[in-house]
Amino acid sequence: MNTPIIERDQQGVGAVENGSGAKASLHGTKEDRMKIAKADYLQMYYYLRLTRALEDRVTVLYRQGRIAGGAYTSHGMEAISVGYAYALHADDVIAPYHRDMGAYLVRGITPGEVLAQYLGKRTGPTKGKDGNVHLGDLRRGIIAFVSHLADNLPVAAGAALAFKLRGETRVVVTNTGDGGTSRGDFHEALNFASVRKLPVVFFCNNNQYAYSTPLHLQMAIRDVAERAKAYAMPSEIVDGNDVGAVYLAAQRAIERARRGEGPTFIECKTMRMHGHSEHDSAKYVPRALLEEWKKKDPILKAERILREWGYATDSDFQAVQQRVIKEIDTALEFAERSPLPEGPEALDGVYADSEREGLA
Amino acid sequence: MTTATGAQEITYLEAISQALDEEMRQDPRVFLLGEDIGVYGGAFRITEGFQDKYGEWRVLDTPLSESAIVGAAIGAGMMGMRPVAEMQFADFISCAFDQLTEVAAKNHYRWGAAVPIVIRAPYGGGIHGGPFHSACPEAWFFHTPGLKIVAPATAYDAKGLLKAAIRDNNPVIYLEHKFLYRRIKEVLPEEEFVVPIGQAKVVREGQDLSLITYGAMVHVALEAAEILEREGIAMEVVDLRTLVPMDTDTILESVRKTSKVMVLHEDTKTGGVGAEIAARIAEQAFDALDGPIIRVAAPDTPVPYSPPLEAFFIPKVDDVLEAARGLAAY
Ligand SMILES: Cc1ncc(C[n+]2csc(CCOP(=O)(O)OP(=O)(O)O)c2C)c(N)n1
């Protein structure tokens, strides 16, 4: 039941046709990897580290009882959102979900803003109106996540529709968990996007659990990517712990969308290494499975590749780690220094000004 | 039809088409999406000929996916478009409930993203549509901060409020009453006009009691007022026109003038808009009242199909007369 997915794929199960009609590899090819410039790989590595450091700090704050609400991390899954966000242009748009901290950071949300949001401060992107990773900013091309899983998929399709209507070559990338793909909005969105060939890429973070529900109780298919076939949508399966593989898959799909050839579905195989949220000990996940996936940690994997390709050495990694820890320290100082909102601010902003022109 | 002076009378339905056409002509950001609105022109023919004029993409036929229709409108709206989404019947708006209450309604509050969309919802009974083609869905959304709701009763307001809704930067649910589509008409001004959202209108003056209503019930109220006048009872009729934000001032002003008030709506009674109106009056004008606040509304059942059942269900002139006579006697 809990056969690691990558092994299953090596047995020949689970590979899905990709856009080019070729079998997608879970590991990417050597030629693929050589397509990533050193500076880009190092930058993605930095974002992996920054995401990890930020979320580790969130976990600490949560355990200290300093976060009023829930806390969700993408621990062990950082490569997915870093990889897809890094493949986008500045004027593209993302509609992320709750395991996509890396994407926020790549798009320019600062760790200080994130921590301010967690602490309910006025300097957070929602000014204390919403918590955890429910944040967005249209100027940075980020549509805020709503808890209701898959609700933002039709919204992402609609943003892509706007680009198509105006003849722009902008692209939208959205992401959801394996559990989220069981919702009707997932299917309505994929169907609509495919019928109208909208410039949107649907990512799925398949971390094998939806809260406590394992994949085989979530769906009767073995690969989430199978779902895309019903919408005649090309799909790929990638190793979600390999930032380079995610980045290149994202790039292929994004460029395809930009060319007007329509949406792509990308399933990223990974493993949720923490509980569903930080309150959850996740006892229902077999320890052996976690041990196994620990070895596939996306940061370790990136380091191995960077070393192998001669792009970086251990001392470079240490320097990055020191840099991000400093950044998080500064961010936390900012968040702590920031004021809390005053109670009556709860009344602000239910409606937009009536006839404001020139929206994003 | 033309009047004696030769001016063209426009139906409620044509008024809606005109508003869409004018806004699409003036603003390239405006586009329409929904089921069967393009080639077919919409279940009620509101957008007949629009696709020839504006093309397949600005009059977009969608799959049968209400959630995707509203969700896509939200996404496009946030990217600077002005989408007008059509629910084929208001009843099916329940399939898009989440998109309206969780996404559209909360985005500006949470993170400052305006959602300038209009959801057109052909609603209401009297057309033998049965339990799934007759609903008045306003109460579900009336309770949701972040949404605006308008419900015009005349061709003039149908046109003016739709134009205002399209220009508004918030999600607006536009309730267009199916019973009124082809039954009422009037001459509309040649020049452009907009009816601002949030303004009720006293459509008949009176000093003995007030009736607060909206939608098709405005016509029931006016007919009743006519009869009451012959009995010596002068009933004032307030057409809300907008449900959210509600023009409480106009309601209270009328109540203070007449000291007696009845609320009338076609939607079912419990937890309906009328309950909120009654509560506001009780809270803010209790001292002015000379009698109980009366609600005349549909009974708490689904809308039945068979003509005698439906006729019983929908509030009618006699119901208003009876309530008004009782109230006037206080
Ligand atoms: C529509 C909806 N139902 C239930 C929830 C509560 N909930 C939050 S996350 C979650 C599990 C999500 O699983 P998945 O989509 O696989 O994403 P993951 O958290 O594993 O990344 C549930 C049930 C929700 N947010 N939305």
Image (cartoon, helix red, strand yellow):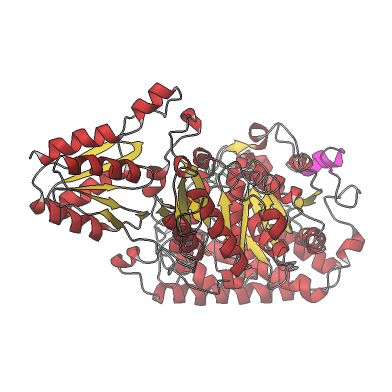
Q: Quadrant of ligand 1?
A: top right
Residue farthest to the front? Answer: B4
Magenta stretch in the rendered image: A6-17
In the shown orientation, is residue B2 left or right of residue A154? Answer: left
The quadrant holding residue A338 is bottom left
Q: Name the residue located 57 percent from the left edge and 47 percent from the top edge.
A: A149
- Which sits in the foreground, B250 or A53? B250
- Which sits in the foreground, A47 or A172? A172
Q: Name the residue located 77 percent from the left edge and 73 percent from the top edge.
A: A40
Visible residue check, residue A131: no
- Which sits in the foreground, B102 or A243? B102
Quarter containing the C terminus of chain B: top left
Question: Picture coordinates of residue A4 (x, y %)?
Answer: 74, 40
Q: Is residue A10 magenta?
A: yes
Visible residue check, residue B309: yes
In the shown orientation, is residue A49 left or right of residue B323? Answer: right
> Height in image: B35 above or below B132?
below
Q: How many marks?
A: 0
